[in-house]
Image (cartoon, helix red, strand yellow):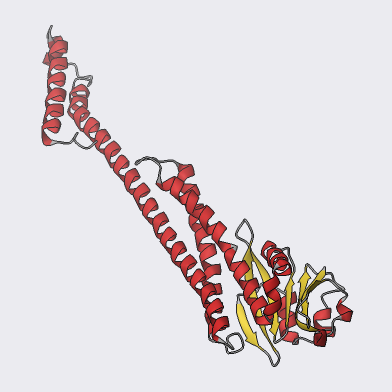
Amino acid sequence: MIRMLAVDQQGQIREGGPLEQLDLSDYRWYWVDFNQPTKEEAPLLETYFHFHPLAIEDCLNFLQRPKLDHYTDYAFLVLHALDHRLQPKEVNLFVGDRFVVSFHKSEVRELDQAFERLAQDPRAADGDANRVAHHIIDQLVDGYFPLVSDLEDQLSQIDDLPPGTSSPNLMNHLFQLRGQLLKLHHTVISMRDLSYRILQSERFNQNKENKAYYKDIYDHLEKLAHILQMNREITADIRDSYLSVNSYRMNAIMMTLTMITTIFMPLSLIAGIYGMNFQYMPELHWRYGYFAVLGIMAFIGTAMFAWFKHKGWFDGR
């Protein structure tokens, strides 16, 4: 589907209209959006707009990293939107002096919102194609914030759990969050680098007002990058705390088992000696031998337990 938004020479905002009837001289600026174009619509990038073959190739083929290329009469940008699963969706943007052409193979909610807001905003008539490009990029970046907030909320729920809470599901969720934060961080960093290039580009910063708008986008991406980095550090702290608690519990269990084993070692020795089947063992014929051996074993076990207690082996378990 191809949709169009334009401002004519009288300052009126217009939507729709056949692409074949588009005449640049009739408009101050126009935005043509190739929204999930069909096989018949995609070739119009070459046959109607005559964009560079390399830029068209980037639009039609595999997912590119965010980038900025300059051509004679326009700039070509590759941008990334994110869906609810944090999967990147490529948005290609051609920005000229009086036109913006966007191309995306999948539905992008942020572009729909940008299109609707521009169509209903009377101030759009006072802008230009550069301001439309800013509005689109700003809308894409604003779409990152709810995703970051959702991950922050999930991380806060884990961080608010009582100390010592431990379960395999908790760690699986934590590692999943860490992976999502890393994926989002890669996208934000790439977009931040692109935003910095736009700030250094004369085509997008022909006046101080435009530069201020693009600087605002860069600040937003810088803030997101800082938040994501901080949250990744929090996940590392939670992971280390979890491993420390598990290690402490394991040490306590091993200490308990070691003490039990140590106490029973002399008792097993005594039981082993008197369990031998030699014929001449004087104590075997003693009337009170059984009770005496049990008493000795009880005394040894109690004495060793008391000695371990005195040494503080039971403290901190």
Location of residue 208 (image quadrant): bottom right
Position above or below: 227 against 47? above
In this rendered view, identify the residue nearer to me: 272 or 297: 297
Q: Residue furthest toward the top?
A: 287
Q: Residue furthest toward the front?
A: 10
Q: Residue furthest toward the bottom?
A: 72
Q: x, y (%) of residue 59?
A: 72, 76
The residue at 68%/79% (across/down) is 126
In this rendered view, identify the residue nearer to me: 204 or 29: 29
**Quarter of the figure with the C terminus:** top left
Position above or below: 314 against 246? above
> Horizontally, is 20 left or right of 94 in the view?
right
Number of on-image labels: 0
Q: x, y (%) of residue 263?
A: 19, 29
Location of residue 8 (image quadrant): bottom right
Position above or below: 276 against 61? above
> Horizontally, is 122 left or right of 305 in the view?
right
Q: x, y (%) of residue 20?
A: 89, 80
The residue at 29%/43% (across/down) is 248
* Visible residue check, residue 281: no
Q: x, y (%) of residue 254?
A: 28, 38
In this rendered view, identify the residue nearer to me: 220 or 150: 220
**Quarter of the figure with the N terminus:** bottom right
The residue at 62%/61% (across/down) is 87
* Visible residue check, residue 304: yes
